Every structure is written in C-alpha cells, then in structure tokens.
Image (spheres, grey):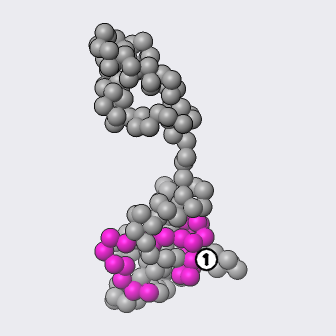
C-alpha cells in the first residue's frame, strides 16, 4: 500500500458508516452518487480509495465496480475490478441498462415505418434530404444519417 493511502486511513474511516450489508460513505458525494474524498489537494472516489487501502494499487485501465450496486458503498468485499465492458455487461445482467431503442425510446420522433419510408424516398431520389426532413419533422443531417445507416441501424423488429 502506498504511503498516501496509509496516511489517509484514519480520515477515511471517520466518514464510513458500517451496516450489516453495505459500508456507506457519509461525507460528500459526486453528482453521480459516488463517495468523494479529498486530502492534500488530491481527490479520490471513496470506493476506489477503499480498494487501494484493502488490496493495493488499481491496475491502469481498470474500474472498481460494486456487486451491491450501491454507489456510496466502500465495503471491500462488495467491490471488484473490471473493464468498461465488464461494467456494461454487469449493468445489462442486472437489468439496469436502458433497453429502449428506436421507436420505443421516449424521445423518438420516428417509427420503423417512417424510417423505411425515408430510406425509400432517398433511394428514388425525387426529393432532397432537406425536403424529406421537413416532411418528417427532422433535420437534413438526420435524414442523411438514416440513409447511410449511421442512425436507425436496424429498423426491423
């Protein structure tokens, strides 16, 4: 364990409330809900500092993830290392990912049928992308993205 982490241990534990399940960070938090710890002009995420105190240095490129999904938890046996892919897979497996895509997304302006029609109109080239966009209430750039497959990659069910 590095010297900084050793010196910070008493300050760290003063801000932790242990329960039977999670050990919750009670001091300040980042906007996203993760614990925030600062000392000597150095800022830490509390769960990452907990990992460092208990297990040592976090390898470059690795994230410290939560088994418990409690962002303020710093209990070391609730933490594990992973990549961004591990984090995404964990999110999906626990049902926390936003599965709403295409016409099911709450901000969707188009249906699958609209996208199929936009592609058909682009293919026959009777109208400009600007004119097609006006017909569907979207910008010319979005029509272009739909036409080349950068948006609405798979409009089929």
Is 20 rendered above or below residue 132? below
| Quadrant in the picture for residue 69 | bottom right
The front one of 106 and 78 is 106
Q: Quadrant of the C terminus?
A: top right
From this viewpoint, is residue 105 visible?
Answer: no
- Name the residue at 44% across, 37% down: 154
The front one of 75 and 128 is 128
- Name the residue at 54% across, 70% down: 66
Q: Dot 1: few (<14), some (14–19), or many (≥20) neighbours within 10 Å?
A: some
- The count of marks equals 1
What's drawn in magenta, residue-wise?
A: 55-78
- Counting from the top left corner in percent of width and height, residue 2 is at 34, 88
From this viewpoint, is residue 61 visible?
Answer: yes
Tell me if 17 is positioned left or right of 33 in this view.
right
Q: Quadrant of the N terminus?
A: bottom left
- Name the residue at 44% across, 87% down: 55
Secondary structure type for disc 1: strand
Q: Is residue 61 magenta?
A: yes
Considering the whole magenta stretch, tell me its main secondary structure. loop
Is 138 rendered above or below residue 16? above
Tell me if 148 is positioned left or right of 28 in this view.
left
Which residue is under mark 1? 23
The front one of 16 and 34 is 34
| Quadrant in the picture for residue 94 | bottom right
- Counting from the top left corner in percent of width and height, residue 138 is at 40, 20
| Quadrant in the picture for residue 147 | top left
- Counting from the top left corner in percent of width and height, residue 95 is at 60, 56
- Name the residue at 44% across, 16% down: 136
- Counting from the top left corner in percent of width and height, residue 129 is at 31, 17
Q: Is residue 77 magenta?
A: yes
Is 68 rendered above or below residue 149? below
């Amino acid at each position: 364990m590095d010297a900084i982490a050793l010196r910070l241990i008493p300050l760290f534990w003063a801000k932790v409330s242990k329960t039977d399940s999670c050990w919750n960070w009670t001091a300040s938090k980042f906007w996203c809900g993760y614990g925030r710890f600062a000392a000597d002009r150095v800022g830490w995420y509390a769960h990452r500092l907990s990992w460092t105190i208990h297990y040592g240095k976090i390898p470059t490129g690795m994230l410290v993830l939560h088994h418990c999904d409690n962002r303020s938890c710093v209990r070391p046996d609730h933490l594990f290392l992973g990549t961004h892919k591990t984090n995404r897979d964990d999110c999906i497996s626990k049902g926390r990912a936003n599965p709403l895509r295409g016409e099911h997304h709450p901000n969707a302006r188009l249906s699958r049928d609209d996208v199929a029609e936009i592609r058909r109109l682009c293919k026959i080239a009777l109208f400009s992308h600007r004119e097609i966009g006006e017909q569907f209430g979207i910008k010319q750039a979005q029509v272009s993205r739909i036409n080349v497959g950068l948006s609405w990659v798979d409009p089929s069910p």
